[in-house]
Amino acid sequence: MNRRHSPKREKVLNVLKDAHCALSAADIHRKIPEIDLTTIYRNLELFVSDGLIKKLDLDKDEAMYEYKEGNHHHAICTDCNKVIHFNVSDLEIMKLIKVPNFTPESLELTVRGKCKH
């Protein structure tokens, strides 16, 4: 759906584009405090439904959002909570994952472990 992008929507989207990482609504609010948190959440949900950004559940206290920049997956350090983006072909992964009587339509891979820092 092509919604009209108001100046506030553009600011929220630009914060995500410029971040090149996942941000929470609170992170976005800290960067643009002139926009109230309710408006930020409302716009994030609109962007998610429009397919412009991705909502991530990374086992943090709140959802994280990132601008869709190509298809990638996430590795999360269980010590420092660092989120690492990595690329692996979805087709390669789906070849390895065989669920009986199930046809996958999309894939979101999150790997947990310890980084070297």
Image: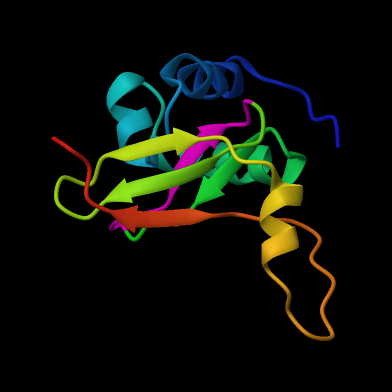
Nearer the observer, 95 or 36 = 95
Magenta stretch holds residue 6: no
Q: Is residue 32 left or right of residue 99?
A: left
Q: Residue at x 54, y 55 (%)?
A: 109
Is 83 left or right of 48, judged from the image as shown? Answer: left
Where residue 34 sits, quadrant-wise, is: top left
62 w.r.t. 31: above or below: below
Q: Residue at x 46, y 19 (%)?
A: 15
- Figure check: 17 above or below 107: above
Tally of numbered tags: 0
Q: Is residue 22 left or right of residue 61?
A: right
Q: Nearer the viewer, residue 23 or 81?
A: 81
Q: Nearer the viewer, residue 94 or 53?
A: 94
Residue at the farthest bottom position: 101
**Residue interval drawn in magenta:** 60-69
Image quarter of the N terminus: top right
Q: Quadrant of residue 104?
A: bottom right
Q: Horizontally, is 6 left or right of 23 in the view? A: right
Q: In the rendering, at what x and y percent does residue 89 appear?
A: 68, 42
Q: Residue at x 22, y 42 (%)?
A: 115
